[in-house]
Protein backbone atom coordinates (compact mmCIF):
# COMPACT_ATOMS: atom_id res chain seq x y z
CA UNK A 1 0.00 0.00 0.00
CA UNK A 2 1.33 3.42 -0.93
CA UNK A 3 1.24 6.44 1.35
CA UNK A 4 -2.00 8.45 1.40
CA UNK A 5 -2.13 11.51 -0.85
CA UNK A 6 -4.22 14.50 0.23
CA UNK A 7 -6.33 16.47 -2.23
CA UNK A 8 -9.52 18.56 -2.23
CA UNK A 9 -12.70 16.51 -2.62
CA UNK A 10 -14.53 16.74 -5.93
CA UNK A 11 -18.05 15.92 -7.04
CA UNK A 12 -16.71 12.57 -8.25
CA UNK A 13 -15.81 11.70 -4.63
CA UNK A 14 -19.24 12.34 -3.11
CA UNK A 15 -20.51 8.74 -3.23
CA UNK A 16 -17.33 7.30 -1.71
CA UNK A 17 -17.17 9.95 1.02
CA UNK A 18 -20.86 9.57 1.87
CA UNK A 19 -20.54 5.79 2.16
CA UNK A 20 -17.46 6.08 4.36
CA UNK A 21 -19.13 8.79 6.50
CA UNK A 22 -22.32 6.73 6.93
CA UNK A 23 -20.43 3.57 7.91
CA UNK A 24 -17.99 5.38 10.20
CA UNK A 25 -20.73 7.35 11.96
CA UNK A 26 -22.79 4.19 12.53
CA UNK A 27 -19.72 2.37 13.89
CA UNK A 28 -19.67 4.54 17.02
CA UNK A 29 -22.76 6.71 17.46
CA UNK A 30 -25.74 4.35 17.97
CA UNK A 31 -26.52 4.09 21.67
CA UNK A 32 -24.44 7.19 22.40
CA UNK A 33 -26.67 9.83 20.80
CA UNK A 34 -30.30 10.84 21.46
CA UNK A 35 -33.16 8.59 20.42
CA UNK A 36 -34.24 9.33 16.87
CA UNK A 37 -30.93 10.70 15.63
CA UNK A 38 -29.56 7.33 14.55
CA UNK A 39 -32.65 6.60 12.44
CA UNK A 40 -32.31 9.96 10.71
CA UNK A 41 -28.68 9.31 9.79
CA UNK A 42 -29.55 7.44 6.60
CA UNK A 43 -27.28 6.78 3.63
CA UNK A 44 -29.23 9.38 1.67
CA UNK A 45 -28.88 11.99 4.44
CA UNK A 46 -25.10 11.52 4.43
CA UNK A 47 -25.01 11.69 0.63
CA UNK A 48 -26.99 14.94 0.59
CA UNK A 49 -24.80 16.48 3.28
CA UNK A 50 -21.54 15.53 1.56
CA UNK A 51 -22.76 16.70 -1.85
CA UNK A 52 -23.71 20.08 -0.40
CA UNK A 53 -20.42 20.53 1.45
CA UNK A 54 -18.27 19.54 -1.52
CA UNK A 55 -20.21 21.83 -3.85
CA UNK A 56 -20.16 24.85 -1.50
CA UNK A 57 -16.65 24.82 -0.03
CA UNK A 58 -13.15 23.62 -0.68
CA UNK A 59 -12.80 22.56 2.94
CA UNK A 60 -13.36 18.83 2.42
CA UNK A 61 -10.08 17.04 1.92
CA UNK A 62 -9.66 13.38 1.05
CA UNK A 63 -6.79 11.00 1.63
CA UNK A 64 -6.45 8.73 -1.39
CA UNK A 65 -4.47 5.51 -1.45
CA UNK A 66 -3.92 3.97 -4.86
CA UNK A 67 -6.98 5.83 -6.14
CA UNK A 68 -9.26 4.75 -3.28
CA UNK A 69 -10.70 7.24 -0.79
CA UNK A 70 -9.16 6.12 2.50
CA UNK A 71 -10.59 8.96 4.58
CA UNK A 72 -11.70 12.56 4.66
CA UNK A 73 -11.83 15.63 6.85
CA UNK A 74 -14.25 18.57 6.76
CA UNK A 75 -13.25 21.92 8.22
CA UNK A 76 -15.68 24.66 9.18
CA UNK A 77 -14.09 27.84 10.51
CA UNK A 78 -12.07 26.84 13.57
CA UNK A 79 -13.66 23.38 13.82
CA UNK A 80 -12.28 20.11 12.49
CA UNK A 81 -15.87 19.11 11.93
CA UNK A 82 -15.67 15.57 10.57
CA UNK A 83 -12.75 13.15 10.34
CA UNK A 84 -13.37 9.60 9.21
CA UNK A 85 -11.09 6.88 7.88
CA UNK A 86 -12.32 3.70 6.22
CA UNK A 87 -11.92 0.60 8.40
CA UNK A 88 -9.46 -0.90 5.89
CA UNK A 89 -7.14 2.10 6.25
CA UNK A 90 -7.18 2.57 10.02
CA UNK A 91 -3.62 2.52 11.27
CA UNK A 92 -2.28 3.60 7.87
CA UNK A 93 -1.40 7.15 8.94
CA UNK A 94 -4.28 8.63 6.93
CA UNK A 95 -6.08 9.98 10.01
CA UNK A 96 -2.99 11.79 11.32
CA UNK A 97 -2.31 13.23 7.88
CA UNK A 98 -5.91 14.46 7.53
CA UNK A 99 -5.92 15.94 11.03
CA UNK A 100 -2.66 17.80 10.33
CA UNK A 101 -4.25 19.22 7.18
CA UNK A 102 -7.29 20.35 9.17
CA UNK A 103 -4.99 22.07 11.67
CA UNK A 104 -3.15 23.78 8.80
CA UNK A 105 -6.41 25.00 7.24
CA UNK A 106 -7.71 26.31 10.55
CA UNK A 107 -4.47 28.19 11.22
CA UNK A 108 -4.48 29.55 7.65
CA UNK A 109 -8.00 30.81 8.31
CA UNK A 110 -6.63 33.04 11.06
CA UNK A 111 -7.59 30.93 14.07
CA UNK A 112 -5.22 30.35 16.96
CA UNK A 113 -7.07 27.36 18.42
CA UNK A 114 -8.81 24.52 16.63
CA UNK A 115 -11.55 22.43 18.19
CA UNK A 116 -13.49 19.26 17.51
CA UNK A 117 -16.19 17.21 19.19
CA UNK A 118 -16.04 13.46 19.88
CA UNK A 119 -19.18 11.59 20.92
CA UNK A 120 -18.89 10.49 24.56
CA UNK A 121 -17.81 6.89 24.82
CA UNK A 122 -15.70 6.87 21.65
CA UNK A 123 -12.52 5.95 23.49
CA UNK A 124 -10.60 5.04 20.31
CA UNK A 125 -11.08 8.52 18.82
CA UNK A 126 -10.40 10.24 22.13
CA UNK A 127 -7.09 8.37 22.49
CA UNK A 128 -6.14 9.22 18.89
CA UNK A 129 -6.75 12.95 19.36
CA UNK A 130 -4.84 12.99 22.66
CA UNK A 131 -1.91 11.24 20.94
CA UNK A 132 -1.97 13.98 18.27
CA UNK A 133 -1.58 16.68 20.94
CA UNK A 134 -5.22 17.69 21.33
CA UNK A 135 -6.48 18.53 24.83
CA UNK A 136 -9.71 17.09 26.23
CA UNK A 137 -11.61 20.11 27.56
CA UNK A 138 -14.47 18.02 28.99
CA UNK A 139 -18.14 17.43 28.31
CA UNK A 140 -19.73 19.43 25.53
CA UNK A 141 -23.30 19.43 24.25
CA UNK A 142 -23.13 19.56 20.46
CA UNK A 143 -26.25 20.78 18.65
CA UNK A 144 -27.21 18.59 15.69
CA UNK A 145 -29.93 18.91 13.05
CA UNK A 146 -30.96 15.81 11.12
CA UNK A 147 -33.78 15.82 8.58
CA UNK A 148 -35.28 18.91 10.18
CA UNK A 149 -35.16 17.61 13.76
CA UNK A 150 -32.89 19.18 16.40
CA UNK A 151 -30.87 17.18 18.92
CA UNK A 152 -28.12 17.66 21.46
CA UNK A 153 -25.35 15.11 21.05
CA UNK A 154 -23.32 14.40 24.20
CA UNK A 155 -19.67 14.93 23.28
CA UNK A 156 -16.22 15.69 24.59
CA UNK A 157 -14.61 18.88 23.30
CA UNK A 158 -10.97 18.72 22.22
CA UNK A 159 -8.81 21.74 21.41
CA UNK A 160 -5.36 22.39 20.02
CA UNK A 161 -3.32 25.55 19.55
CA UNK A 162 -2.53 25.69 15.84
CA UNK A 163 -0.62 28.99 15.61
Image (spheres, rainbow, N blue to C red):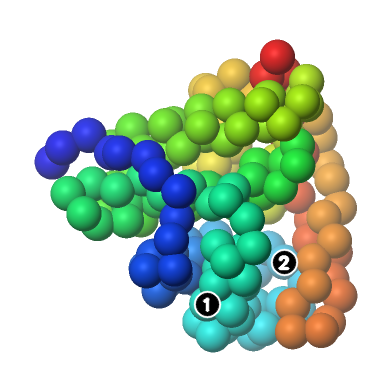
Residue linked to disc 2: 33
User: For the point 39% across and 44% down, which residue is it?
Assistant: 7
State the separation of the CA atoms marked 2 and 1: 20 Å
Badge nearest the viewer, 2 or 1: 1
Question: Dot 2: within a 10 Å radius of its alpha carbon, few (fewer than 14), some, or many (20 or more) residues?
Answer: some
User: For the point 57% across and 51% down, which residue is it?
Assistant: 58
Asked whether residue 89 is in view, the answer is: yes
Split into 4 quadrants, where in the image is the N terminus? top left
Residue linked to disc 1: 47
Q: How many labels sit on residues?
A: 2
Q: Residue 89 versus residue 81: which sits nearer the camera?
A: 81
User: For the point 68% across and 19% down, which residue is it?
Assistant: 162
User: For the point 86% across and 75% down, which residue is it?
Assistant: 150
**Residue at far top of view:** 163
**Residue at far left of view:** 1
Q: Earlier in the sequence, mark 2 or mark 1?
A: 2
Question: Dot 1: within a 10 Å radius of its alpha carbon, few (fewer than 14), some, or many (20 or more) residues?
Answer: some
Q: Position of residue 101 (x, y in %)?
A: 51, 32
Mark 2 lies on a secondary structure that is loop
Amino acid sequence: MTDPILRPATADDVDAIATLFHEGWHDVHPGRVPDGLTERRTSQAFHDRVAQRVAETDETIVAAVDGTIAGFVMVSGDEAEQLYVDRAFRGSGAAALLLSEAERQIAAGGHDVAWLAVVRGNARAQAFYAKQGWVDEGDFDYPVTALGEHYISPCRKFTKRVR
